[in-house]
Image (cartoon, rainbow, N blue to C red):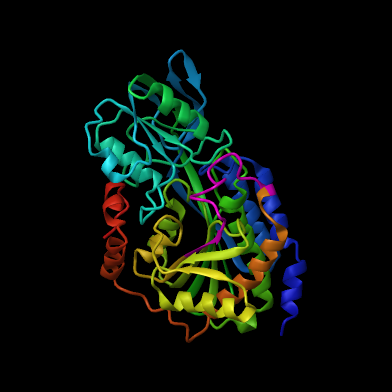
């Protein structure tokens, strides 16, 4: 039967929810906007016929943006604070560490304000996360951290610092545009500069939307996304599109429920952008997870991309669907420990993150004020709905190869990828 494909290609349910999310404005973790987005997502899922749609609340460390600046010479240069930066000021000589590779921090940075790029060069065989660069700066004695975008357009980047044990970071941290970063590096390297961050850090609440589709089996395939977004932008790609896709897939899968051999559990997490807090909360309590298919950055490009972490059954589902529709899907056989599938994978459970090939290095428009709805195409959304619906049906098959592996195997794979040292530094190593 293919009637559902035409239905999916003409539906506006998911796209309308995407518009609803981006029009909320600020969906920062713990904010009233995030709560509004969670409630809107719960209601949208109820409207397409899922079972038991509800919000599971949990407490978080809140963070509310104030002003920030980088002072160089006689000027205050534009910046935005990195979420969970502490409030305060730091003064010191500016040290330009370029791409911020691990070896770049092997020096005495006591009292310095360090400047690092948001990207890594092609010859580096792994992505070095912002938080790893931040904590290498902390470990080397830096007093302040300046994160410069590699994407032009006067777009300062955001992104959180902090750890699970210490949610507020140790030194003031700001993001600056590529252009401001270039000026700092050219004009002020070696000179005294200052970084200032004003913010509030109240207690706050977040939550996760949960619901079910299909047979009442003990185990479930988790279809997930995150609802929150950084407060500087609409959060269209990251991750309004992922949550809107969960809603659209829920509509499709309720119509195809008789094809599901395993229950599909929907989980739209809060507080992803501040350290995978929502998914970590859920993973600590879940005992029914067969596999996790996490949508984070879908629709940013026409070709789906998924990191499957060496789980053959996950790869097989995507490859089967790609062949069925003669539609390319990029399958990456490595772990990506930076999205909401990760707290489950860290327990040995099969999990993947689904995004898209964008042609950009790093996040592109993501984590900047340019992450807006106009960057997305409804045609791509509809195409990916069709592909992902069949992926979920494949994963829900009784004979899908979705056996868990040992935590030791996950740790060994991360070590082989070169991720272990950085994850230990940032407090993200759970083994």
Is 341 displayed left or right of 136 in the figure? right
Q: Seen from this angle, which residue lies furthest top?
A: 74
Counting every numbered tag in the picture gives: 0
For the record, the magenta segment spans 353-374
**Residue occupying the point 75% across, 61% down:** 12
Residue 166 found in image quarter? top left
* Residue 275 is inside the magenta segment: no
| Residue 216 drawn above or below residue 274 | below
Q: Is 16 or 233 nearer to us in this picture?
A: 233
**Residue occupying the point 60% across, 52% down:** 237
**Whole-percent x and y of residue 133?**
34, 42
Q: Is 137 or 215 nearer to us in this picture?
A: 137
Quadrant into which the N terminus falls: bottom right
Q: Name the dominant secondary structure of the magenta segment.
A: loop
| Residue 402 drawn above or below residue 239 | below
The reply to whether residue 216 is visible in this rendering is no
| Residue 26 drawn above or below residue 297 | above
Quadrant into which the C terminus falls: bottom left
**Whole-percent x and y of residue 148?**
45, 35
**Whole-percent x and y of residue 77?**
50, 22
Q: Is 305 or 165 nearer to us in this picture?
A: 305
**Whole-percent x and y of residue 243?**
60, 58
């Amino acid at each position: 039967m293919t009637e559902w494909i035409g239905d999916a290609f003409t539906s506006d349910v998911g796209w309308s929810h995407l518009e609803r999310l981006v029009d909320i404005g600020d969906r920062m973790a713990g904010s009233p906007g995030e709560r509004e987005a969670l409630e809107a997502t719960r209601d949208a899922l109820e409207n397409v016929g899922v079972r038991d749609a509800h919000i599971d609340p949990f407490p978080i460390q809140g963070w509310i943006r104030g002003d920030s600046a980088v002072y160089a010479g006689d000027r205050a240069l534009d910046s935005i604070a990195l979420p969970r930066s502490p409030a305060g000021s730091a003064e010191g000589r500016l040290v330009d560490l370029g791409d911020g590779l691990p070896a770049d921090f092997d020096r005495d940075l006591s009292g310095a304000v360090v400047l690092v790029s948001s990207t890594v060069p092609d010859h580096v065989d792994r992505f070095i996360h912002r938080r790893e660069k931040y904590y290498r700066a902390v470990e080397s004695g830096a007093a302040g951290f300046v994160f410069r975008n590699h994407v032009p357009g006067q777009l300062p980047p955001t992104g959180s610092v902090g750890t699970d044990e210490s949610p507020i970071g140790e030194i003031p941290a700001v993001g600056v545009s590529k252009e401001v970063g270039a000026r700092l590096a050219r004009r002020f390297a070696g000179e005294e500069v200052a970084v200032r961050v004003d913010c509030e850090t109240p207690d706050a609440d977040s939550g996760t939307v949960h619901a079910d589709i299909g047979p009442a089996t003990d185990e479930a395939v988790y279809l997930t996304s995150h609802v929150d977004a950084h407060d500087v932008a609409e959060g269209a790609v990251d991750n309004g599109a992922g949550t809107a896709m969960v809603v659209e897939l829920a509509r499709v899968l309720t119509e195809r429920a008789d094809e599901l051999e395993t229950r599909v559990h929907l989980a739209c997490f809060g507080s992803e952008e501040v350290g995978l807090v929502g998914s970590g909360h859920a993973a600590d309590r879940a005992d029914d997870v067969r596999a996790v298919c996490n949508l984070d950055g879908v629709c940013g490009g026409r070709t789906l991309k998924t990191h499957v972490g060496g789980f053959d059954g996950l790869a097989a589902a995507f490859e089967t669907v790609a062949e069925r529709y003669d539609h390319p899907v990029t399958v990456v056989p490595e772990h990506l420990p930076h999205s909401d599938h990760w707290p489950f994978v860290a327990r040995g459970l099969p999990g993947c993150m689904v995004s898209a090939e964008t042609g950009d290095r790093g996040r592109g428009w993501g984590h900047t004020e340019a992450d807006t709805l106009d960057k997305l195409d409804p045609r791509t959304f509809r195409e990916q709905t069709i592909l992902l619906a069949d992926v979920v049906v494949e994963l829900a098959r009784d004979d899908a190869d979705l056996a868990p592996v040992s935590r030791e195997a996950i740790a060994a794979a991360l070590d082989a990828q070169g991720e272990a040292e950085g994850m230990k530094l940032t407090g993200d190593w759970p083994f």
